[in-house]
Structures are given as structure tokens and as C-alpha cells.
Amino acid sequence: MSVDGFESTALFTDRYELTMIDAALRDGTAQRRCVFELFGRRLPGARRFGVVAGTGRLLEMLRDFRFGDDELRYLRDNHVVDAETLAFLEGYRFTGTVTGYREGELYFPGSPVLTVEGTFAEAVVLETLALSVLNHDSAVANAATRMSIAAGDRPLAEMGSRRAAEHSAVAAARAAYIAGFGATSNLEAGRLWGIPTMGTAAHAWTLLHDTEEEAFRSQIEAFGLDTTLLIDTYGIEEGVATAIRVAGPGLGGVRIDSGDLPTVAAEVRAQLDALGATGTKITVTSDLDEFAIAALAASPVDAYGVGTSVVTGSGAPTAGMVYKLVARQDAAGGWVSVAKASSDKASKGGRKAAFRTLEHGTATRELIVVSDGFEEVQTAADQPDARALQVTLVEGGEVDAGALGPAGVQTARAHHLRAREELPVRALALSRSDPAIPTVFVDVEG
């Protein structure tokens, strides 16, 4: 619901976040200063690197994290928390600090992707929101970057809106663009985030008309010779012949959405060339993923359109990140490192500074410096042979405006492409493997 001009995001959370606040207000621990960390224990799908995506969306949602009358009424009527907690939530504003990896940055197991510092009550309630945004968007970006690598210089378009929930589709288009896609079919993603949009006609357009020729002729009259004609509603060979008969050799492009794509693409290219349409480009769609794109590398294909695989993470639909308390103040105000010790789910306590060491411009390791003292954390000056990975995203509750909106998306996209250039060659392979560079933790005195 709208709260003072904002659309509240406060109930995009799990109940236990609020019940913990309820109990912490009762026992006096709600105001203890805490450090929470969002990270992944491993890379999903045994991939070689991950991509941080969703940060700008999260910051916008954090800015609008307010409990208005409708949210408070729901909590009260359903007896979720008591009156004292309702009063606290009514005045809730995040006043802490968030540091983290830039959107578009690469990450590895143990990378402190996001660090949230504030009181327990104001920081713990952000767990579900942070994870839901970053786990989804990073999963899409993880798939999209692999597809971008496989495509090389050939353009990629995201067209998976019909395979995702409506809001997820917009978020997925944004994440795919950050990770290397060049356009989306989703108009809301174009409006909100400034992403180039594309699209011409589906099979329904051809089926609407009495003949394929009528459909092609009408499309060209509406959009000009630069348009792309979908040639596989009936027979592909017949579709190519009809397209060039109607448009002539100056037709902009054809799209293939079925068949054995390497074979069909070669046949279509040969037919187009024989008809004099040597400049007509070929776009392929049809359930592509990174492996199918790689298999088409030697084929005469000019562009790809990807739907289901990219918006669902191509086999890894979540990035698997977690949000854990890693440090807190004790009753006397001193800082204490804390960590979960469960088998296969352990975390590492302490405040962390993250760096990527480079040799001749190539990444060699993810260096995580863990400080037992909480006032001093290492900076870039302490690691002159490495690139510092963390930036301040929120300071005193104020969100970095540069990370928001279409400008933030463009910045993230540019940063991702630069960061990807640092990867060693082995990171670009699509096969399952260990991370491309190791994560090394170093404990130091603060």
C-alpha cells in the first residue's frame, strides 16, 4: 500500500523477522549493533563464477520499506506482534550502513556480497527482502553471462516474459541486460530501466492472414524492409522464398523458431544467398540456452533470442545466497564475532574486507580479510596489488542515488563487462567445475 507517496515494501518479508523483533524488544537486545552478511557458500550449478544483480532494485525497495496504516492493521488484526512492536514498526526507518559488491560485479564462494550494519531490529528485518531480490536476479544474471560469453559478438535478446511471473519477468530482463544481453521484449522493463526493446510478430500474425505472402506483405508495409519475418509457420524453405519474393533482397532479417537449428540455419543462409539476399540477417530462437548457443558458434547465425532458460536461471533458479549475523555487540558494548557452525552450513564470523588480486590484469584469487577488531577494516591502500570490491551503498540510511534507476543499470552493465575481462580463460568454459579463482580468508588484528 502507498505510504507517504511510496509503495510500501514492508510486508515483502517472512513472519519470523517480525517475531524476532517482537522478542528482542521484550528482552532488550533489539538495539544491539549488529553486522549481517549476505553471501553464497557455493556457486549454483558448479559454475565458475557468479554475477551480482538486483542491488539497485533492492536499494529502491529499502528506500520504500515503511509500515503504513494498512500494513500495521494487518499485523495487529492477525496478532503477528504486540502493541510495543507495532509502535516500533510504525516509526521504522533504516538508519544503518550497507556496503557491498557493485551491481554487475563477479562473486565467488564466501564473497561478502552485501554487509548490513545497524541495530538488530532494523537490520534483521531486511533479510527476506535482500535474499529474494539478490537470489533471483543473480540467478538470472549467472545464466545470462554464460549465454553472453557463448554468443560472443552476436546480439542477444531476452524474450522470456511469458515464462515468468509478471514482476519477475521485469526483474529478469533487467538482470539479463546487466549481464550482457542487448535488448528485451518486455516493455515494462524498457520503461522502468531504460533497456532497449525489440519484437515484430509471432506465428499468430501469419496465421491471421489467408496466406503467408499476405502476412509478410502487410508486415513490410507497416514496418519497412528492415523488419524481421518469421519464416517457419509453414515450411521454412517456402517461407524464405516467399519472404524474398515479397521484400526483395534488401530484407532486414528472418527468424527461425524451430527445427535442428545448425542444419536449418545453414540451409536458410544458402537459400538467402542464392536469392541475392546476402545481407539479410538470421535470428534464431527456439528454447535456446548457453549450450545451444555455443553449438551454433560455427553456424551462419547473426542474433539469438532467449526465453525460458535465461529467466529461470538455466537450471539454477536461485543463487543460493544466505544472510547471516557475523558480528554483534555484547551487553557491555564490546564487539563479538559470531558464526553458525552447523555441518555444511557454517558461516565465518567477523567484519570483512574483500579484494580481488590481479596478475597482469587477470584475477588470481578472491581475498577476504577478516578483522577481529571492528573499528579498523582494511582498505585498498592495504592491498596495493588487488582491486577493492566493496562500495558504500547506504550511509546513515541514505541510499546511493547513483545505483538507482536506468542510470544505475547502465553503470552495472558497464562494470560487469569490465570485471568479466579480468577472468582467466578457464572461467569462460561452460562445463561444471570448481570456481575459476579460489577464495582465500585471512584473519588479521583490527
Image (cartoon, rainbow, N blue to C red):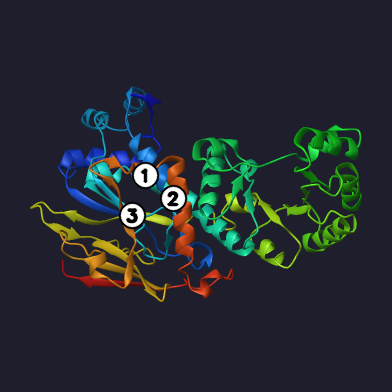
Kind of residue at disc 3? Gly
Query: As rendered, which of 392 and 35 lies closer to the eye?
Result: 392
- Choose mark 3 or mark 1, whichever is in front: 1
Q: Name which residue lies at 85% across and 49% down.
A: 249
**Helix, strand or loop at disc 2?**
helix
Which class describes the residues within 10 Å of circle 3: few (<14), some (14-19), or many (20+)? many
Where is residue 396, by image quadrant? top left
Query: As rendered, which of 284 and 131 lies closer to the eye?
Result: 284
Lower position in the chain sequence, tag 2 or tag 1: 1
Q: CA distance from mark 2 to mark 1?
A: 8 Å
Q: Which residue is mark 1?
A: 402
Q: Which residue is mark 3?
A: 100
Say whether marks 2 and 1 touch (CB < 8 Å). yes
Dot label at residue 210: none
Where is residue 197, by image quadrant? top right
**Helix, strand or loop at disc 3?**
strand
Lower position in the chain sequence, tag 3 or tag 1: 3
**Helix, strand or loop at disc 1?**
helix
> Residue 397 in the image: x percent, y percent?
26, 41
Q: Say above or below: 420 vs 258.
A: below
Q: Which residue is mark 2?
A: 411
Q: Is residue 374 left or right of residue 262?
A: left
Kind of residue at disc 1? Gly
